[in-house]
Image (spheres, rainbow, N blue to C red):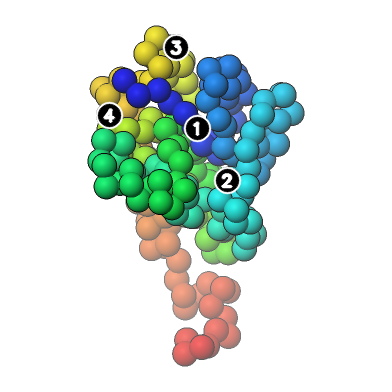
Amino acid sequence: MRRVERALISLTDKSGCEDFAGALATMGIEILSTGGTAQKLRGSGIQVTDVSDFTGFPEMLDGRVKTLHPLVHGGILNQRDNAEHQRQCSEQGIKPIDILAVNLYAFAKTVAIPGCTLVDAIENIDIGGPTLLRAAAKNFHDVTVIIDPSDYAQVLAELRTHGNTTLVTRFRLARKVFELTSAYDTAIAQWLQAVDPATDSYFSGADDHA
Protein backbone atom coordinates (compact mmCIF):
# COMPACT_ATOMS: atom_id res chain seq x y z
CA MET A 1 0.00 0.00 0.00
CA ARG A 2 1.48 3.36 -1.11
CA ARG A 3 2.10 5.74 1.74
CA VAL A 4 0.42 9.15 1.87
CA GLU A 5 2.71 12.09 1.09
CA ARG A 6 0.54 15.18 1.01
CA ALA A 7 -2.83 16.53 2.21
CA LEU A 8 -4.79 19.61 1.19
CA ILE A 9 -6.96 21.03 3.98
CA SER A 10 -9.31 23.96 3.30
CA LEU A 11 -12.30 24.17 5.61
CA THR A 12 -15.27 26.34 6.51
CA ASP A 13 -16.08 23.95 9.38
CA LYS A 14 -12.76 23.95 11.21
CA SER A 15 -13.86 21.79 14.15
CA GLY A 16 -11.16 19.26 14.90
CA CYS A 17 -8.93 20.45 12.07
CA GLU A 18 -5.95 21.28 14.28
CA ASP A 19 -5.85 17.83 15.86
CA PHE A 20 -6.36 16.19 12.47
CA ALA A 21 -3.68 18.21 10.67
CA GLY A 22 -1.33 17.90 13.62
CA ALA A 23 -1.64 14.12 13.54
CA LEU A 24 -0.97 14.09 9.80
CA ALA A 25 2.10 16.25 10.29
CA THR A 26 3.53 13.90 12.92
CA MET A 27 3.32 11.14 10.28
CA GLY A 28 5.48 13.22 7.96
CA ILE A 29 2.60 14.22 5.68
CA GLU A 30 2.97 17.66 4.07
CA ILE A 31 0.01 19.97 4.73
CA LEU A 32 -1.22 22.33 2.02
CA SER A 33 -3.85 24.89 2.93
CA THR A 34 -5.50 28.21 2.12
CA GLY A 35 -6.68 31.38 3.85
CA GLY A 36 -8.20 31.11 7.29
CA THR A 37 -7.52 27.39 7.58
CA ALA A 38 -3.80 27.90 6.98
CA GLN A 39 -3.76 30.72 9.54
CA LYS A 40 -5.55 28.58 12.14
CA LEU A 41 -3.20 25.63 11.65
CA ARG A 42 -0.11 27.82 11.87
CA GLY A 43 -1.51 29.31 15.05
CA SER A 44 -1.38 25.80 16.51
CA GLY A 45 2.26 25.41 15.49
CA ILE A 46 1.58 23.18 12.48
CA GLN A 47 3.84 23.68 9.47
CA VAL A 48 1.71 24.56 6.45
CA THR A 49 2.48 25.23 2.80
CA ASP A 50 0.16 27.80 1.23
CA VAL A 51 -1.47 26.54 -1.96
CA SER A 52 -0.25 29.71 -3.68
CA ASP A 53 3.34 28.75 -2.82
CA PHE A 54 2.71 25.18 -3.96
CA THR A 55 1.39 26.34 -7.35
CA GLY A 56 3.49 29.49 -7.74
CA PHE A 57 0.28 31.35 -8.56
CA PRO A 58 -1.35 33.85 -6.18
CA GLU A 59 -4.89 33.74 -4.87
CA MET A 60 -6.84 36.30 -6.87
CA LEU A 61 -10.27 37.72 -7.72
CA ASP A 62 -11.25 38.01 -4.05
CA GLY A 63 -10.33 34.38 -3.46
CA ARG A 64 -12.45 33.07 -6.34
CA VAL A 65 -9.32 31.58 -7.89
CA LYS A 66 -6.91 29.79 -5.56
CA THR A 67 -7.12 26.01 -6.00
CA LEU A 68 -8.15 25.96 -9.67
CA HIS A 69 -4.69 25.07 -10.95
CA PRO A 70 -3.18 22.09 -12.83
CA LEU A 71 -0.66 21.43 -10.05
CA VAL A 72 -3.55 20.97 -7.63
CA HIS A 73 -5.96 19.07 -9.84
CA GLY A 74 -3.22 17.08 -11.52
CA GLY A 75 -1.99 16.14 -8.06
CA ILE A 76 -5.45 14.86 -7.17
CA LEU A 77 -6.56 13.27 -10.44
CA ASN A 78 -3.46 11.40 -11.55
CA GLN A 79 -3.75 7.63 -11.35
CA ARG A 80 -0.80 6.36 -9.37
CA ASP A 81 -0.58 3.03 -11.19
CA ASN A 82 -0.85 4.61 -14.66
CA ALA A 83 2.67 4.88 -16.11
CA GLU A 84 1.68 7.53 -18.65
CA HIS A 85 0.04 9.65 -15.95
CA GLN A 86 3.18 9.39 -13.88
CA ARG A 87 5.39 10.30 -16.84
CA GLN A 88 3.33 13.42 -17.48
CA CYS A 89 3.32 14.36 -13.79
CA SER A 90 7.09 14.03 -13.65
CA GLU A 91 7.45 16.10 -16.80
CA GLN A 92 5.19 18.87 -15.46
CA GLY A 93 6.40 18.82 -11.85
CA ILE A 94 3.05 17.62 -10.49
CA LYS A 95 3.23 16.19 -6.98
CA PRO A 96 0.56 13.84 -5.61
CA ILE A 97 -2.14 15.11 -3.26
CA ASP A 98 -3.34 12.03 -1.41
CA ILE A 99 -5.80 13.45 1.14
CA LEU A 100 -8.33 16.21 0.63
CA ALA A 101 -10.30 17.69 3.53
CA VAL A 102 -12.69 20.37 2.26
CA ASN A 103 -16.02 21.92 3.26
CA LEU A 104 -18.21 24.09 1.06
CA TYR A 105 -19.39 27.67 1.48
CA ALA A 106 -22.56 27.62 3.55
CA PHE A 107 -25.00 28.53 0.77
CA ALA A 108 -28.10 27.18 2.52
CA LYS A 109 -27.34 29.08 5.73
CA THR A 110 -26.68 32.27 3.78
CA VAL A 111 -29.95 32.25 1.85
CA ALA A 112 -31.87 31.39 5.02
CA ILE A 113 -30.90 34.78 6.49
CA PRO A 114 -33.82 37.22 6.18
CA GLY A 115 -33.17 39.81 3.50
CA CYS A 116 -30.53 37.73 1.69
CA THR A 117 -29.95 39.30 -1.71
CA LEU A 118 -29.07 37.66 -4.99
CA VAL A 119 -25.57 39.17 -4.68
CA ASP A 120 -25.15 37.59 -1.24
CA ALA A 121 -26.35 34.25 -2.56
CA ILE A 122 -24.09 34.30 -5.62
CA GLU A 123 -21.01 35.11 -3.54
CA ASN A 124 -21.74 32.05 -1.41
CA ILE A 125 -21.86 29.63 -4.32
CA ASP A 126 -18.71 27.57 -3.93
CA ILE A 127 -16.81 26.79 -7.13
CA GLY A 128 -13.36 25.57 -6.12
CA GLY A 129 -14.64 23.38 -3.28
CA PRO A 130 -17.03 21.20 -5.31
CA THR A 131 -14.44 20.96 -8.08
CA LEU A 132 -11.81 19.69 -5.65
CA LEU A 133 -14.24 17.31 -3.99
CA ARG A 134 -15.51 15.83 -7.23
CA ALA A 135 -11.97 15.37 -8.53
CA ALA A 136 -10.88 13.57 -5.36
CA ALA A 137 -14.05 11.46 -5.21
CA LYS A 138 -13.67 10.45 -8.85
CA ASN A 139 -10.12 9.29 -8.08
CA PHE A 140 -11.05 7.52 -4.84
CA HIS A 141 -8.85 4.60 -5.88
CA ASP A 142 -5.89 6.78 -4.92
CA VAL A 143 -7.24 9.74 -2.94
CA THR A 144 -8.96 10.02 0.44
CA VAL A 145 -11.58 12.77 0.46
CA ILE A 146 -13.11 14.05 3.71
CA ILE A 147 -16.09 16.39 4.09
CA ASP A 148 -17.14 15.46 7.62
CA PRO A 149 -14.98 15.93 10.75
CA SER A 150 -16.55 12.76 12.18
CA ASP A 151 -14.47 10.80 9.64
CA TYR A 152 -11.12 12.14 10.86
CA ALA A 153 -10.70 9.45 13.51
CA GLN A 154 -11.11 6.51 11.15
CA VAL A 155 -8.82 8.05 8.56
CA LEU A 156 -6.11 8.63 11.16
CA ALA A 157 -6.49 5.11 12.56
CA GLU A 158 -6.02 3.57 9.13
CA LEU A 159 -3.08 5.82 8.32
CA ARG A 160 -1.37 4.78 11.55
CA THR A 161 -1.98 1.11 10.81
CA HIS A 162 -1.38 0.92 7.07
CA GLY A 163 0.26 4.19 6.00
CA ASN A 164 -2.87 4.87 3.92
CA THR A 165 -6.62 4.40 4.09
CA THR A 166 -8.33 1.28 2.75
CA LEU A 167 -10.01 1.26 -0.64
CA VAL A 168 -13.36 0.52 1.01
CA THR A 169 -13.03 3.60 3.21
CA ARG A 170 -12.04 5.77 0.28
CA PHE A 171 -15.08 4.55 -1.66
CA ARG A 172 -17.41 5.24 1.28
CA LEU A 173 -16.04 8.77 1.64
CA ALA A 174 -16.27 9.41 -2.10
CA ARG A 175 -19.92 8.38 -2.07
CA LYS A 176 -20.59 10.95 0.67
CA VAL A 177 -19.05 13.63 -1.55
CA PHE A 178 -21.40 12.99 -4.47
CA GLU A 179 -24.37 12.97 -2.12
CA LEU A 180 -23.23 16.36 -0.78
CA THR A 181 -22.50 18.02 -4.12
CA SER A 182 -25.82 16.80 -5.53
CA ALA A 183 -27.73 18.30 -2.59
CA TYR A 184 -25.64 21.48 -2.77
CA ASP A 185 -26.39 22.10 -6.45
CA THR A 186 -30.06 21.27 -5.90
CA ALA A 187 -30.28 23.86 -3.11
CA ILE A 188 -28.75 26.51 -5.37
CA ALA A 189 -31.02 25.69 -8.29
CA GLN A 190 -34.15 25.71 -6.13
CA TRP A 191 -33.29 29.06 -4.55
CA LEU A 192 -32.53 30.65 -7.92
CA GLN A 193 -35.84 29.36 -9.29
CA ALA A 194 -37.58 31.61 -6.77
CA VAL A 195 -35.77 34.74 -8.02
CA ASP A 196 -37.95 36.82 -10.33
CA PRO A 197 -35.88 39.08 -12.64
CA ALA A 198 -38.99 41.22 -13.18
CA THR A 199 -39.03 42.29 -9.54
CA ASP A 200 -35.54 41.65 -8.12
CA SER A 201 -33.51 44.85 -7.67
CA TYR A 202 -30.39 43.10 -9.02
CA PHE A 203 -31.84 43.41 -12.51
CA SER A 204 -33.06 47.01 -12.22
CA GLY A 205 -31.68 49.04 -15.08
CA ALA A 206 -29.61 46.12 -16.33
CA ASP A 207 -28.79 46.11 -20.04
CA ASP A 208 -29.58 42.59 -21.24
CA HIS A 209 -27.41 43.18 -24.29
CA ALA A 210 -24.31 44.39 -22.45
Compared to residue 39, the image places residue 192 above or below, namely below
Q: Residue at x 62, y 63 (%)?
A: 61
Q: CB of mark 4 within 8 Å of CB of mark 3?
A: no
Distance from Cα at disc 3 to Cα at disc 2: 26 Å
Q: CB of mark 4 within 8 Å of CB of mark 1?
A: no
Q: Give the labeled residue for mark 3.
A: 160
Question: Which of the pair 183/164 is nearer the observer?
Answer: 164
Residue type, mark 2 in image: Phe
Distance from Cα at disc 2 to Cα at disc 4: 27 Å
Query: SS for tag 4?
Result: helix
Q: Give the labeled residue for mark 2.
A: 54
The residue carrying pointer 2 sits among few (fewer than 14), some (14 to 19) or many (20 or more) residues within 10 Å by Cα, namely some
Question: Which of the pair 64/105 is nearer the observer?
Answer: 64
Distance from Cα at disc 1 to Cα at disc 2: 12 Å
The first of marks 4 and 3 along the sequence is: 3
Q: Horizontal and vertical percent for residue 43?
A: 74, 28
Q: Horizontal and vertical percent for residue 149?
A: 49, 25
Compared to residue 132, the image places residue 210 above or below, namely below
